[in-house]
């Protein structure tokens, strides 16, 4: 995944789709993905990551903004393997984090729109108490995220997105008459050749 796509996802998780930790606290959320006690703190006063997080997010919540997790060196979400980010996103939409099925589905739909151009998607692979649990899976490349307003006569823009051979049929304007089909000359009766009358 590109850095641009990752940052688009991070913006969503810290904005409209957030908070990224859902109904859990941040340590519990991250503890399901990482062995936090084995990760060194970035603060020399502490030995492990949980102390670091507690100090800068709970004791002094203004130290770090909500997007701190995406650039924390112990969690390579910005520049690490795709699988690391995929696991984070799957946890984000897990029923334990997002208990409301409708809200979870909305977040999955938005994330899939951001993941799709890179060839990835989130799909349910099992259910817990009737609620889907998602995992990442390969998906066809959806192409560029292009939003174009289309008028009835503006087919050039469709060529950019669908290609000229994949355009849907254009609706006929109200009151317009269908254009007559060109005559099919192959089915027409052969014309008779006029011969001069025989002389008697």
Image: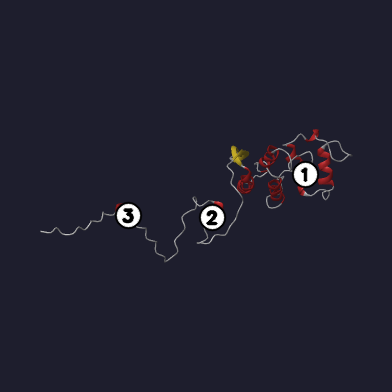
Q: Residues within 10 Å of mark 1 (few under 14, many from 20)?
A: few
Residue 49, x across and y down, in percent: 81, 38
Residue bearing mark 1:
71
**Figure label count:** 3
Classify residue 102 as left or right of residue 178. Answer: right
Classify residue 185 as left or right of residue 41. Answer: left
Residue 100, x across and y down, in percent: 63, 46
- Residue 40: quarter of image: top right
- SS at mark 3 in the image: helix
Residue bearing mark 3:
185
Measured in 3D between alpha carbons, the distance from the residue under mark 2 to the one under mark 1, in whole angstroms, is 39 Å
- SS at mark 2 in the image: helix
Q: Which numbered disc flags the more N-terminal residue, 3 or 2?
A: 2
Classify residue 19 as left or right of residue 42. Answer: left
Residue 44 vertical placement versus 102 (above, below): above
Q: Which numbered disc flags the more N-terminal residue, 2 or 1?
A: 1
- SS at mark 1 in the image: loop
Q: Nearer the viewer, residue 24 or 73?
A: 73
Residue furthest out toward the left:
200
Q: Residues within 10 Å of mark 2 (few under 14, many from 20)?
A: some
Residue 89, numbered label:
none
Could you tell me if the residues under marks 3 and 2 are in contact, i.e. CB atoms within 8 Å?
Answer: no
Q: Which numbered disc flags the more N-terminal residue, 1 or 3?
A: 1
Residue bearing mark 2:
158
Residue furthest out toward the front:
199
Classify residue 193 as left or right of residue 98. Answer: left
Residue 74, x across and y down, in percent: 78, 38
Residue 30 vertical placement versus 175 (above, below): above
Name the quarter where the N terminus is drawn.
Answer: top right
| Between marks 2 and 1 in the image, the one whose residue lies nearer the viewer | 2
Q: Nearer the viewer, residue 175 or 97?
A: 175
């Amino acid at each position: 995944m590109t850095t641009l796509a990752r940052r688009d996802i991070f913006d969503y998780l810290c904005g409209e789709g957030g908070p990224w930790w859902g109904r859990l606290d941040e340590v519990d959320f991250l503890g399901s993905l990482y062995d936090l006690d084995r990760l060194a703190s970035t603060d020399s006063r502490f030995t492990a990551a949980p102390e670091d997080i507690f100090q800068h997010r709970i004791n002094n919540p203004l130290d770090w903004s909500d997007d701190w997790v995406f650039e924390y060196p112990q969690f390579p979400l910005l520049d690490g393997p795709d699988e690391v980010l995929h696991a984070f996103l799957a946890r984000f939409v897990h029923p334990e984090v997002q208990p409301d099925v409708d809200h979870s589905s909305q977040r999955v739909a938005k994330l899939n729109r951001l993941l799709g151009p890179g060839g990835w998607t989130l799909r349910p692979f099992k259910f817990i108490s009737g609620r889907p649990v998602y995992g990442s899976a390969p998906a066809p490349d959806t192409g560029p995220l292009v939003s174009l307003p289309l008028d009835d006569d503006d087919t050039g823009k469709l060529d950019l997105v669908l290609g000229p051979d994949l355009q849907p049929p254009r609706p006929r304007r109200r009151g317009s008459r269908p254009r007559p089909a060109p005559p099919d000359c192959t089915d027409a009766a052969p014309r008779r050749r006029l011969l001069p009358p025989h002389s008697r």
